[in-house]
Image (tube, rainbow, N blue to C red):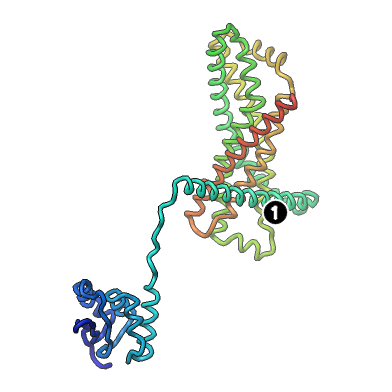
């Protein structure tokens, strides 16, 4: 084909005759022709004897004008060169997608389907978490008897991040919550002339529940998200692939030090939270109820058994293990984008807090039934 020739579509009777070059350089002119002829194209045939050059853009306009079925029928026994015939056929077949009619779903069926999908997602998540907990425990038991494989530097750095840096906020928050609990107790118990039992309320609630629960929720929001972001950034930067290429185990290198650090930090933070909460309650009792700190401590010593302190402190390592494992697992699940890091960081916080509260509820029921 020598020079450049404009493309045309001419209607002769009930047949469209395509002539000239139907190529991308003529697309704007050809598109205007096609749009002006669309209303007359119904039921017409196609004839390609005058066709010059053809590319995908021109072929798509022909199919748009006459429809895939008409073009495919016209290609049977057409004098077109083999290459043009194959191109037109491929374009027509690719555009011959029947429109899917979306049937309106019954709202009840849609709700059940949505519930089923969410339950299946929770099941997959639980399965993944159980597998990762098993892998972490296996690596932990493999490393602990071998001191030469301990990662002291990573462990100390994680203790500093998870424990020492979190201490002020845990102490402040539990102090304020202790004061609020004491105010509520004093307000309610005053109607019964039993404001002295505000001391028992504050001590009992913080030793058994609030001390460990508030510290765990704070660490879930503060530290689990940090673990996910750190490991997720390493995944995005392909540092995890580099670790595996060097023959190192990412779980041993990244997960075990963080898990051990959390299991050391959370009991300490729980103890600080218990003390701060009771101090907050004691301040309110001294200011509002005329119960001096010496009397506060005497009531605590007389009425509150040691088992309440041990029950609260015993839950801390379990919560710490779960928070650390969920944070690290979400980090490993990050795909190669910054958006994925943000999504999994949010997911790790939500999952950690949910699991902490769920386990705490189960533990509360268990201890109540056991009479502990």
State the image coordinates of residue 341 (x, y, percent, origin top left): 51, 52
Residue situated in front as seen by the camera: 317 or 192: 192
Number of labelled discs? 1
Horizontal and vertical percent for residue 25? 26, 80
Tag 1, which secondary structure? Answer: helix
Q: Is residue 14 left or right of 194 when viewed as pictured?
A: left
Relative horizontal placement of residue 159, taking residue 108 as reference (left or right): right
Q: Residue furthest top?
A: 193
Q: Quadrant of the N terminus?
A: bottom left
Q: Residues within 10 Å of mark 1 (few under 14, many from 20)?
A: many
| Residue on which the image places disc 1 | 252
- Please, is residue 255 above or below residue 74 in the view? above
Q: Is residue 242 left or right of residue 311?
A: left
Residue 344 pos. (x, y %): 53, 50
Please identify the quarter of the rendering in which residue 15 is found.
bottom left
On screen, residue 101 above or below 365: below
- Image coordinates of residue 16 in percent, x first then y, are 23, 82
């Amino acid at each position: 084909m020598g020079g450049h020739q404009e493309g045309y579509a001419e209607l002769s009777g009930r047949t469209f005759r395509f002539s000239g070059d139907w190529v991308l350089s003529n697309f704007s002119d050809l598109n205007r022709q096609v749009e002006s002829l669309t209303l007359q194209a119904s039921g017409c045939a196609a004839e390609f004897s005058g066709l010059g050059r053809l590319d995908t853009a021109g072929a798509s306009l022909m199919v748009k004008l006459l429809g895939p079925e008409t073009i495919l029928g016209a290609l049977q026994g057409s004098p077109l060169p083999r290459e043009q015939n194959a191109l037109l056929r491929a374009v027509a077949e690719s555009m011959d997608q029947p429109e899917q009619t979306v049937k309106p779903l019954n709202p009840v069926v849609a709700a059940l389907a949505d519930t089923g999908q969410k339950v299946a997602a929770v099941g997959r998540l639980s399965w993944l978490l159980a597998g990762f907990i098993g892998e972490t425990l296996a690596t932990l038991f493999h490393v602990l008897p071998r001191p030469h494989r301990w990662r002291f530097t990573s462990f100390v750095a994680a203790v500093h991040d998870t424990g020492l840096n979190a201490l002020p906020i845990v102490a402040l928050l539990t102090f304020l919550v202790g004061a609020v609990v004491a105010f509520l107790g004093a307000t309610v118990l005053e109607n019964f002339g039993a404001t002295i039992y505000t001391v028992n309320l504050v001590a009992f609630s913080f030793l058994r529940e609030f001390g460990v629960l508030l510290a765990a929720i704070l660490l879930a929001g503060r530290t689990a998200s940090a673990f996910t972001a750190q490991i997720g950034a390493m995944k995005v930067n392909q540092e995890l692939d580099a670790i595996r290429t060097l023959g190192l185990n990412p779980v041993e290198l990244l997960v075990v030090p963080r898990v051990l650090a959390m299991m050391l930090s959370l009991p300490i933070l729980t103890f600080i939270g218990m003390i701060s909460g009771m101090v907050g309650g004691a301040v309110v009792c001294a200011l509002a109820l005329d119960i001096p700190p010496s009397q506060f401590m005497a009531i605590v010593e007389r009425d509150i058994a040691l088992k309440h302190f041990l029950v609260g402190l015993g839950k801390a390592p379990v919560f710490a293990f779960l928070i650390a494992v969920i944070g690290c697992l979400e980090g490993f699940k990050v795909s190669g984008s910054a958006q994925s890091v943000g999504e999994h960081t949010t997911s790790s916080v939500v999952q950690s807090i949910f699991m902490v509260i769920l386990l705490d509820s189960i533990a509360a029921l268990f201890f109540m039934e056991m009479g502990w």
